[in-house]
Image: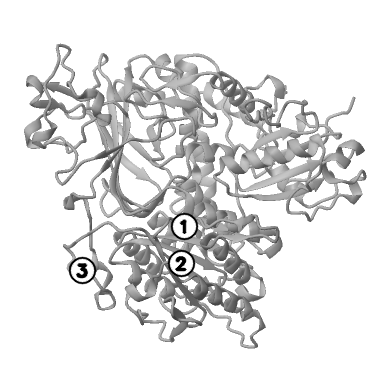
Amino acid sequence: MYAHIPQPPHSAGATLPGFRAHIEPRQIPSTAESIEVDRAKWESQTYMTLPGSHVPQSTTDFVAIDQGNSSPKFIRISTWRVPSTLRLAEDLSIPIVTVIQPFADLDEREEPVPVVECGESGPARCEKCRGYVNPWCTWTTGGTRWKCNLCAHETRAREVEPEYFSALDANFTRLDYSERPELQKGTIDFDVSQSTSYWASNPLQHLNLANTLSGPTSSDAARKPEMIRYVFVLDTSNTSVLSGFLTSVCVALGSILFSRSSEDGSEATRACLPPGCSIALVTFDDALHFYDLSPNQVPPRQLVISDVDEPFLPLPPSALFVDPHQSRVVIESLLDHLQQTSLSPVVISQSCLGSALRASLAALAHIGGHIVSFVCTLPGLGPGQLVPLENSNHDQTLEDKKLYVPRDVEWNNLGEACADAGVGVTMFIAPTKFLDIASIGAVPSLTGGDMFFHWDFKPLRDGPIMESQLRRLVTRKTGYNCAVRVRASSGLRADQLIGNFHLPNPNTPTSGTLDSDQAFSTSFSHTATLPLHQHAFIQCAVLHTTADGRRRVRMINLALQVAELAGDVFRSADMDVVVAHFTPMKRMPTHKIFTIQEELTEQCSAILCSYRRTCAAASVQTQVPKYLDPDVRNYHRHKLLGASVRSTMYHIYPRMLAVHDLSDSIALPHPETGVIKMPSLMRGSHVFMQANGIYLIDNEELQVLWVGQSASPQLLLDLFGVDDIFKVDIRIMELPVLDTRFSKQVRNIIAQRCKERGGRVTKLLIARQNFDAAEIEFADMLMEDHNNAALAYPDCACDERRDSISPI
């Protein structure tokens, strides 16, 4: 019998003030156990979305049937029974907040979201609140009117479209009910491509780029929906070249743009851009480089813009964008040429990222699209130029909150201009030193773009990871030219929206792009008492253009029961949503980290105190990761602002598995169905680990495989191909492919996690007990331990219990 291990090397934690009571860790409520119980329940059940049923946790894979209420995959709320009054809500301290993921991926067993063609008149909408027709509306007066479930106003059907009229049967149901998906499903897509009133406007007066554009020049002109266009912006400065980042970018671009075969004739990579879309390539160092990629230009013609302070387009957008399949030879020759840049004796250490983004915006401003930039060097030239910060890693130099706002307002202005133009900006960042993500990261944060962070980029280690991220970026469902509107029924009001978007006005955020991995949160407050015997309603509309050039409205409807008892509210609470809402990274620009930690503790204590006062005893865990480097903090802040509830939970409480004692049937395909059953999770603490074990932990950004000193030589041989722990190669990027059951099981687990992330690969580290530096990374992800400037879970539970009892 092996004893439990001591806590591995880790970052410093906080100390518990006052008397420390002994708490047995196994008697404290377990996050991992809760996840496993919920997963076991829904493995054999189908979730029916009508109000009143128990909702699966965000960490559970389930199959939902839309019965007029949107699936929790699209929208989750902090409590599925809304407090009837403002006073009850305040007494319970549970915020009424939703986390909405409009384009969430569905299970392959689920029905796809229906599409309703609306013609030139558009979908039926309420005359008063402008809400959309949905399954919870009621039809009256023989079918000539419908009553809005949001504001109770009756809208005349003939005002919408004569063809939309239908008589009612004896149950006041439309005779064409079975032919109207919008009256049956909670989540629906209205296709409004033919209705010009839903087209995106042309905001040229904000951009001052009219002289560079072709197409409409009036700010009032509506822009006809077109297929998405991509501009790939590559950093060719000396740092990018020497680190191998530029070469890896060229390889990754080639793999997603073109299908390629391996030596044996099998398909090695598959082109994954939407068919028919067009691309442009721009490179930058101390100047801008544009390329004419026309099929007849071999090699491609290069146009250099040396005036980076006032960038402009040397070619009209119609000449910059090409179909990658028609111009394959030209593009491949350009990518090959860029990979040879490392052989050039010319050393250029400067970067004009702001100029490159401005010029790329000019190319897309007349239609919208997506800018994908690859950045390695601090921009020291052109608009938004920055200078290095001294002692940027130390909080004593600047106040915490100043590290999370742009140092130059140009980056905010650029982000807002991109969002207004319907252009999203994604950044792949590979710094070797301070890059000021607080400044340059404002652009993707305001435009709905993504951000991928590769510190100290190594081509062999990070190249395949970046390629998988880029592939996921262009294959996931993405809308551009997006506008969002959240409405609630009488008695509730949408107050604040939080996410990666621009807020030109408080009620209608806009973003250049919105994808299936992005989410945003909305808080609500009471404006009146809610009727107990009626439902409360929330409706979210996302107007967007799809990648294949269709203008649509993604409609999400949620009906909720109303409660007057505190116990009903707590029993229906979704604590995953509450945790996501409390994520402290969202308040970094305005608060110091210590203040955020104190406020978070007080909020959790208030909820626990309310629960103790009105229901029963309980425990709450709070741990706030405190990152040291400002760039790392800003990167995580951006990710958490737009993360789904599921991703947030797995980031805050990483999944941990004991892989050394897997049974013969776990993590292997079922012989009949082919389904792989995943092993159960374990609690994230060294208290539950043994020295003969092998453990895998995953926080959605990093996976660490920890190998105990006393691990069986046979297990090592089956997994690594060596039977001595000292011979295990910790530099491997992926596990060796061995024909052993144990090797197949562990590789299947890692592959399944990758599949759950849409094919996005994460970095894998090997940590041998008491030998490797990666053990610190592993120990810091054990969220129930004393680390990350936070208390251990037992100490935290003791402290929270003391704080929650004192006000009673």
Mark 2 sits on what residue? 324
- One can see residue 710 in this view: yes
> Based on the displayed image, in which of its 4 quarters is residue 100 positioned?
top left
For the residue carrying disc 2, how many other residues have a C-alpha within 10 Å: few (<14), some (14-19), or many (20+)?
many
Could you tell which of marks 2 and 1 lies nearer the N-terminus? Answer: 1
Q: Tell me, for residue 698, which label it has, or none.
A: none
The label number, if any, that marks residue 273 in the structure image: 1
Residue 598 horizontal/vertical position (percent): 52, 40
Horizontal relation, residue 228 to residue 727: left or right: left
- Secondary structure beneath dot 2 equals loop
**Label 3 vs 2, first from the N-terminus:** 3
**Residue 161 image offset from top left, x and y in percent:** 10, 37
> Residue reaching furthest top?
170
146 lies left or right of 616: left
Which label is found at residue 216? Answer: 3
In the foreground, 666 or 51 = 666
Residue 57 in the image, given as x and y percentages of width and height = 51, 27
**Disc 2 + disc 1, Cβ < 8 Å:** yes
Residue shown at the point (54%, 51%) measured from the top left: 636
For mark 1, give the secondary structure: loop
Q: Amino acid at mark 3?
A: Pro
